[in-house]
Image: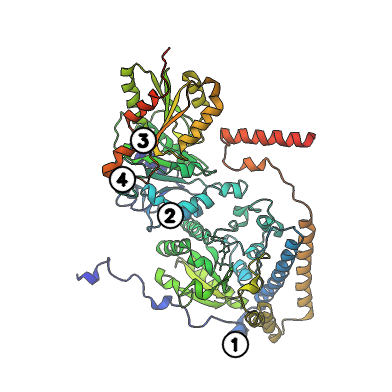
Amino acid sequence: MAQALNQALRDALAADPSVHVMGEDVGTLGGVFRITDGLARDFGDDRCTDTPLAEAGILGAAVGMAMYGLRPVVEMQFDAFAYPSFEQLVSHVARMRNRTRGALPLPITVRIPYGGGIGGVEHHSDSSEAYYLHTPGLHVVTPATVEDAYGLLRAAIASDDPVVFLEPKRLYWSKADWSPQAPAEVPPIGRAVVRRAGRGATLITYGPSLPVCLEAAEAAKEEGWDLGVVDLRSLVPFDEETVAEVVRGTGRAVVVHESSGFGGAGAEIAARITERCFHHLQAPVLRVAGFDIPYPPPMLERHHLPGVDRILDAVGRLQWEEG
Amino acid sequence: MTVLDTPAWRPRTEAGPLLPDQEPFRLLGTPEAARLAPDLLTRLYAQLVRGRRFNRQATALTKQGRLAVYPSSTGQEACEVAAALALGPRDWLFPSYRDTLAVVARGVDPVEALTLLRGDWHTGYDPRAARVAPLSTPLSTQLPHAVGLAHAARLSGDDVAALAMVGDGGTSEGDFHEALNFAAVWKAPVVFLVQNNGFAISVPLAKQSAAPTFAHKAVGYGMPGRLVDGNDAAAVHQVLTEAVDRARAGQGPTLVEAVTYRIDAHTNADDATRYRDQDEVATWRAHDPITLLEGELTGRGLLDDALRQRAAEDAEALAADLRTRMHDDPPLDPADLFAHVYAEPTPQLREQAAMLGAELEAEQRS
Ligand SMILES: Cc1ncc(C[n+]2csc(CCOP(=O)(O)OP(=O)(O)O)c2C)c(N)n1
């Protein structure tokens, strides 16, 4: 996935001279995750810029650059280190189009490596999507596959609206048959994708939890359960149609994500499913999420992250009656 | 090579030339002022008089309920006017919520400049057309924008500078620091103007900063700091013009502290008698920017009845125009609420827009 993201940045820089990559260590080093590897060398310091170490400054400067017609792609080094830039994001980035009545749209992409499972010490594993998706004016997307990493990032950079682009850092090293030369057709931002069809119940997920859900669906076959998996890909816009259609077909749904459950994305999704599909539901919509605790230290994180067992447990609680 | 010779240690800039003068720079009343072009002085004068009248009219409009709030810049007009006049047509201004006057002096329609404070919409003008960023309510957050814009202009090879305005209180915010640091490292063509008007709402200077002056802060970032009498319109204009020219010439940013005073309360809703001494206000009233400039103009035989009358009439016309146009209720379109959240509304926004539409239709029927 890291390579696909790098290729997306590379292709965007080559295709459009107004695209600028900036952040901490993105130049010579290529970013701490190497996502910007070689970009400064190939496109110059002005197109891929090492900035001073200041997240509000990075995003604030990006606002001014976007006001002048550039398309900044900002890298925040880690999820929890994006918080200093939160005010710029919420008070300016998200609402500049709105407060200027459409005169100043801000085509900024904020790339944030997020989530746990890599054994990071504190402040390196937060899942911060709920903060962003609660802020009108932002798009919030998160790829779970290598194709999406490429396609969604290209779409985010091309978008005339600000996009918070959440990169599941534990999938950076995931491999797939993916050729930089022939990027597959990727559905646009705002479209969910059914990754696995299943008639018994639907797992609804995104980002780092997708592989876990696919694994759970596979394991469920042993119990005779036929699980489908929907990958949201985009939390804002939220593809309510696809989700509602799939859930109406199964009547049972579990929303899975690794960030804390309380006030999380899953709460919103579960509420919407209930509003849209109440008469089709055979059971309450359940959530499997991380605990409502500060992200735990690495040696304990496996207890926090939703795994296959916890997902299957929830599926069991849907009061399974096949047929 | 010794350790001290390595790039990791070597000082990057000589501190000396960056230091501000001990006393605020003044022009009016000094021998140097004799060299100032009469045209510049009379233009500054006309703008000061207009500005003072604008502040008074806008405050009156709050009493009539036509403005939700007005943070007056009475006493600070010299900074406002000089900010606008120091910029070329292609330069950008990044104002704070108190800087409506600079926005108007830059040529934005006064009614549009007051849109935010009127409360019918946020930004009333097209920032790109006016080359004026929206008035910023969160303190200092517009400063990094100015840096980014100036940097982008330089990358594009354009001869454009940005002037960003901030109050003394705003200098304590993290964004102030980040903006100055970015600007200096990037050598961005940007000028920061701190209007030190003595107070951040009720908090006086001594509780805001322990720095010798705000201009001194520049040294730590590696840019020059300039201290100027903020009530001396000619001095502020000269210092800002030099700083803007310096920026355009690729020599990087400048931090200018203009020492001024907020004669009115923080806004029309504030009671300044709770936190400050009336003698202090009187002292500053005696150092009024209009009086100072009038003194100079009179000394040079430039202030005749005709000029006085023209300036006064122009200011009255501005006030009358404001009264007339602000008297009408603005046309409001509720559909606007959903029109500018995203380029394409999300499905959820479409649904909500339809709901509001139905509510409005029902309202009209009943
Ligand atoms: C980030 C932020 N915190 C608090 C406020 C509330 N507030 C508005 S004006 C003000 C004082 C600002 O003082 P100063 O920067 O000196 O500017 P002045 O009002 O004197 O022009 C405060 C605290 C705000 N607008 N933004």
Q: Amino acid at mark 2?
A: Pro
Q: Are marks 1 and 4 on the same chain?
A: no
Task: Mark 2 or mark 3: name the one nearer the start of the chain.
Answer: 2
Q: Which residue is mark 2?
A: A84
Q: Which residue is mark 1?
A: B31
Residue furthest to the top in view is A323
Q: Secondary structure at mark 3?
A: loop
Mark in the foreground, 1 or 3: 3
Q: Are marks 1 and 3 on the same chain?
A: no
Instruction: Report the Cα–Cα distance between label 4 and label 2.
Output: 20 Å
Q: Say which chain tag 2 marks.
A: A
Instruction: Report the Cα–Cα distance between label 1 and label 4.
Output: 62 Å
Front residue of A229 and A48: A229
Q: Secondary structure at mark 4?
A: loop
Q: Secondary structure at mark 2?
A: helix
Where is residue A57 drawn, in percent x and y? Answer: 44, 57
Instruction: Report the Cα–Cα distance between label 2 and label 3.
Output: 24 Å
Residue A33 circle label: 4
Where is residue B69 drawn, in percent x and y? Answer: 68, 60
Q: Amino acid at mark 1?
A: Pro
Where is residue A221 drawn, in percent x and y? Answer: 33, 18
